[in-house]
Image (spheres, rainbow, N blue to C red):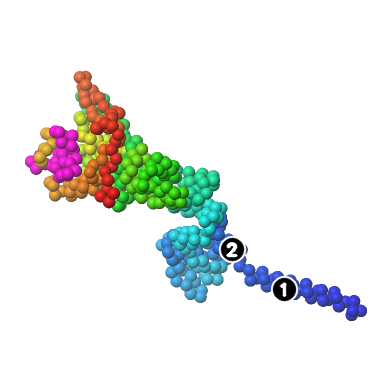
Amino acid sequence: MNRTRRPRAWLDVRLIVALLASMVLASMAPPARAQVETGESGLQPGDPPVANEPGQSLLIMNDGRRFQGRIKSKDRFELVLEIAGIDTRFKVADILEIVALKTFDEHYAELKNAIAREDWERRYQFCQWIHKRRRLELAARELEELLDDNPRLEDARELLRIVNAEIELQARQEEAEAERQTGPEESAAAPQGEGPRLTPTMLLTDEDVNLMRVYETDLKNPPRLLVRRSTIERLLSEHATSELLPTTPEGRKAYFRRDPVDILADIFTLQARDLYGEVQVLSEPLSLNKFRLNVHRVWLMNSCATNQCHGGVGAGRFFLFNKRANTANTVYTNLLIIERTEYRGEPMLNYDRPERSPLLQLGLPRDRSIFPHPEMDGWTPAFRDQSDPRFTRTVEWMRSMYMPRPAYPIRFEPPFVVFNLGGEAAARGPQAEEVPGGGDAPPPPAQPER
């Protein structure tokens, strides 16, 4: 009897031991939630959250909720987490796990070092991760490098197209933000006895605005730039014999990864004028920003460009736009008008001696000006004297502009307003004309270091 039962009893013991072992191993395995949180590649849909600022942590609660913030204090029973500036208290018994978070830059450096150069799939996922974090310019640079190493990745090429479009859209939205903050346009009626109010409406295009930004870019203190791959390909192809550009396949590959500022410097040096407009200037050069903030916004719109002065039917030969005054198209159009206008044979802006510029002198009291403003009812000086902060800031802006001054290759004629024999105001808008001097537009003059 015992002999017949013994094998079965031995088998039961082995099953029990195996079951206990599996239970022990299961208890030692990390929770499934933690595995998702710290995935091996960091590029999966459950990639680790990124700290908004250094020193943040993630609390994973027993019920699955998650809270991100900075730990202010912690003892055996309670943890205080600062979330968006508010201290929130949690019971330690309710916390499953505390994960110390890393910043985006820390994650970026670790992931980039961990991916092999020939691992196209993970490099593409890396670019997707950067894009999801809305680091658009960095995503574009990584995608450019990926396509440089493997041009056959169509998914990467399509993502690069999307990223570049989003970069341009973001830049336009930033410029339009000022316009949204302004009120609706004025629609004042013409004064009694005058004809219908007619004023020019044609402004510079977005392409013209970008081209002016290219010409005013200071390579020592550059704005944000974007040079597309197609532009670099044209540069390398059309100037292949230049000693400035690489000729070996390895050198040309590396050139695609160069800083956009260095590429623009080469474009300037080679006077590749047909490529100037292809360089996208995503933020405003410092000199043009000074004109916008210290001149256009502070006194030009309030003193010169009002409807009763050079922004209305009485503007005469010096008309300035005052609608949507904060948009880049209006600001840059008015700057170009001022640069291409003369007063008594003198350019309105004297960059050699800014204090003597007619634009500034006409804003001084008549007894203190070398170009006194004509007698007009209601006219008041824009400046108290040459020590007026608005006057000195305007001089400072002029001295910050690119020197010697380039001639923008933009076909634009300053608008003006005249009255016909019937007493009606007739608007003369910008008309197409040849660039002053004729021929090709000159390149921006070389920087001293070039």
Question: Quadrant location of residue 179?
Answer: top left
Question: Quadrant location of residue 94?
Answer: bottom right
Tell whether 171 sits left or right of 429.
Answer: right
Bin the neighbour count of mark 2 within 10 Å (Cα to Cα): few under 14, some 14-19, many 20 and up: few
Q: Are marks 2 and 1 in contact (CB under 8 Å)?
A: no
Q: Residue at x 21, y 47 (%)?
A: 399
Tell whether 148 sits left or right of 353.
Answer: right
State the quadrant of the N terminus. Answer: bottom right
Magenta residues span: 342-368
352 w.r.t. 88: above or below: above
Q: What's the residue type where badge 1 is placed?
A: Leu
- The answer to whether one can see residue 145 in this image is yes
Q: Residue at x 29, y 44 (%)?
A: 216
Q: Earlier in the sequence, mark 2 or mark 1?
A: 1
Q: Which mark is residue 435?
A: none
Q: CA distance from mark 2 to mark 1?
A: 24 Å
Q: What's the residue type where badge 2 is placed?
A: Gln
301 w.r.t. 81: above or below: above
Q: Where does the image place residue 288, in percent across and percent down from the top left?
A: 28, 45
Choose between 435 and 25: the one closer to the eye. Answer: 435
Q: Where does the image place residue 335, in percent across and percent down from the top left?
A: 25, 39
**Which residue does the numbered mark 2 point to in the structure image?**
35
- Looking at the rendered structure, the secondary structure element under dot 2 is helix
**Which residue does the numbered mark 1 point to in the structure image?**
20
- Give the tally of numbered discs: 2
Q: Residue at x 51, y 66 (%)?
A: 99
- The answer to whether one can see residue 310 in this image is no
Which residue occupies the extreme bottom position in the image? 2
Q: Where does the image place residue 153, in percent across and percent down from the top left?
A: 54, 47
- Looking at the rendered structure, the secondary structure element under dot 1 is helix
